Image (cartoon, rainbow, N blue to C red):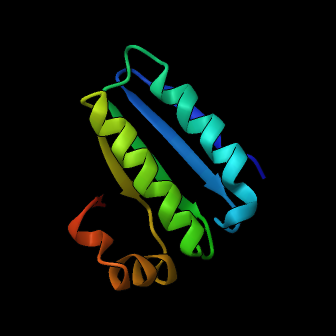
């Protein structure tokens, strides 16, 4: 399922639904780019509440989003991670590179 974009003032939320894997690459890129194109967005939240798992390609997509957000001086946080998702992020040391709430 395609990511859902929610704008709340200066915060853009990217709600992911279902497995976050290579099949979601195109939709994730389009959704994240539309948030980056919004001039009023200062913080991007990637919401994992409805994500049961993610794979290595998802980690790559998150790194690219982090680089693009940083280039525009925007903050990025990963939120509502399930335990299985949080474990993958910790194994990949993403807890040292990202704000995870």
x, y percent for residue 41: 38, 23
Residue located 50% across and 83% down the image: 84
Q: Nearer the viewer, residue 60 or 91?
A: 60
x, y percent for residue 7: 49, 26
Q: Is residue 68 left or right of residue 93?
A: right
Q: Residue 53's quadrant in the figure?
A: bottom right
Q: Is residue 7 left or right of residue 78?
A: right
Residue located 39% across and 75% down the image: 89
Task: Give the farthest residue toward the top.
Answer: 39
Q: Residue 17's quadrant in the figure?
A: bottom right
> Does 4 appear above or below 101?
above
Q: Quadrant of the C terminus?
A: bottom left
Q: How many marks?
A: 0
Residue located 41% across and 56% down the image: 63
Q: Is residue 22 left or right of residue 39?
A: right
x, y percent for residue 65: 44, 46
Q: Residue 43's quadrant in the figure?
A: top left
> Does 7 appear above or below 31?
above
Residue located 40% across and 57% down the image: 79
């Amino acid at each position: 399922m395609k990511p859902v974009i929610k704008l709340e003032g200066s915060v853009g939320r990217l709600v992911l639904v279902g497995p976050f894997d290579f099949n979601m690459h195109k939709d994730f890129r389009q959704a994240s780019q539309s948030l980056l194109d919004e001039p009023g967005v200062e913080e991007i939240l990637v919401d994992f509440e409805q994500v049961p798992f993610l794979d290595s390609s998802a980690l790559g997509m998150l790194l690219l989003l982090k680089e693009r957000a940083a280039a525009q001086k925007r903050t990025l946080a990963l939120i509502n991670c399930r335990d299985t998702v949080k474990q993958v992020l910790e194994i990949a040391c993403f807890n040292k590179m990202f704000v995870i709430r």
